[in-house]
Amino acid sequence: MLREAASHTGTLTLTLTLTLTLTLTLTLDPDPDPDPDRQVAKLGASHPGVGGTYNNMANVYMYQASYDLALAHFGKALVIQTRELGPDHLEVGATFANISCVYEIQGKNDHALNYASKSLAIKVKKLGAGMGVYTPVYLSLSPSTIDTYSRTHVLP
């Protein structure tokens, strides 16, 4: 009987039924307030949420081609982020990249590359010098801007 069992080959199929219940609870502010002035009154002028709102507003202004307003709001965000998160925080680097985009759109290539380089320096410091770090910073810049800059500067 043992030999008989050993000589037979076959497939064993198991069916497993698994039931998973996931409960997710989100607590949202019942009255979210995107106005930075009211956020300042509620949270304080140095709260990172206020900086995030300035950053979001700056992006809207940039897409509306209101570049001076965009730069002013990115500047406000940058002050809060630098003070509250530190000068080498990735959010500060992201804001530098956003400022770079505004200057690139305006054709102010030297300013654009200056801020792109600041952004890149933070990303390299925090994430390492892999190729994935360079890509987001320089994708927003035109090839001619990068070419002009690379003739006179060493890219980090």
Image: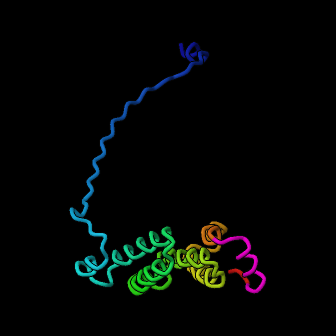
Q: Does residue 53 lie above or below 4 as drawn?
A: below
Residue 2 located left or right of residue 58: right
Residue 88, x across and y down, in percent: 50, 82
Above or below 44: residue 26: above
- Queried whether the magenta region covers residue 64, the answer comes back as no
Disc count in the image?
Answer: 0
The quadrant in which residue 116 appears is: bottom right
Q: Nearer the viewer, residue 65 or 43?
A: 65
- Residue at x-position 78% and y-position 82%: 151
Which portion, as a residue range, is magenta? 141-153
In the picture, which quadrant includes the C terminus? bottom right
- Residue at screen point 64% across, 74% down: 129
- Asked whether, in this view, residue 108 is left or right of residue 148, the answer is left
Q: Position of residue 115 (x, y in %)?
A: 58, 82
State which quadrant residue 38 falls in: bottom left
Left-right relation of 58 to 40: right
Q: Residue furthest right?
A: 151
Dominant secondary structure (helix, strand or loop) of the stretch shown in magenta: helix
